Image: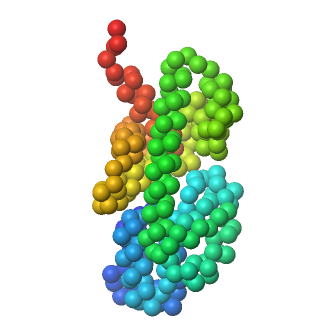
Amino acid sequence: MLLDETVTDTVLGRGGPAFGKLVADRTLVSMGSTAPEYARGLAADVQAAGGRFVEAPVSGSRRPAEAGELVAMLGGDPDTVAEVRPLLAPMCRETVHCGPAGSGVLMKLAVNLYQDTTIAALAESVHFAQRQGLDLDTFRAVVDSGQLGSGVTRVKIPMLAAHDFTVQAATADAYANTRLIADAARAAGIATPLLDLSSDLYGESVRLGNGRLDMSSVLTAIESRTDTAPDPS
């Protein structure tokens, strides 16, 4: 589960003589978040060198990882995927085969689109409640008692209320993911208006120095916009 495409290529020695020796007769499981076309290209190179390839990006941040409750989205040959699944069981509550190579990371991007926009919307909602003078414990109770209550709200609302940005999933990573999603969307001619707005906010939070803090630090970008807005009076 490496940081990005450059790191993955470096570790594998891709493009050099070491690559073939490393992957021949082996199964490579790539768990990083990459562009779909990169995953397809890597799969082709591995197979050409006599190896097998499965992509297995995951949904979930630090707490699900520590609890072994990640969800892996697998892409690759069905037989190879079946062999890899037991190896992922200690860290993944679910392993879902999404299709051939490229499908797993595309599914991850679709899930992350929902996650990234949801966290930004939740931060904005907490900001609105706080600036309106509402009690945030009561706000949390109302949200968690209704249809919108979830593991995300139960973890993130207390963090947002306390400005506790202890990293679960880093802001810089969330921002990078929004750019991956946007690139894949543009390549397919797909509009992503909510994603684009959220990406701007994550980018602002990174520029505020929050890159290695939790992605809920997107709240500070929203607060900054409020604090620099013209006085309505």
x%, y% of residue 152? 60, 43
Q: Which residue in the rendered view is the most extreme toward the top?
A: 233
Asked whether the viewer can see residue 224, the reply is: yes
x%, y% of residue 145? 69, 33
Horizontally, is 148 left or right of 46 in the view?
Answer: right
State the image quarter where residue 87 is shown. bottom right
Image quadrant occupied by the C terminus = top left
User: What's the colour scheme?
Assistant: rainbow
Horizontally, is 84 left or right of 198 in the view?
Answer: right
x%, y% of residue 59? 56, 58
Asked whether the viewer can see residue 213, the reply is: no
Rendered residue at 58%/55% (across/down)? 60
Vertically, is 39 above or below 149?
A: below
Vertically, is 66 above or below 49?
A: above
Rendered residue at 62%/79% (across/down)? 82
Which residue is at the front of the view, 134 or 210? 134
Rendered residue at 30%/61% (across/down)? 187
Which residue is at the front of the view, 125 or 17? 125
x%, y% of residue 174? 45, 50
State the image quarter where residue 16 is shown. bottom left
State the image quarter where residue 227 is shown. top left
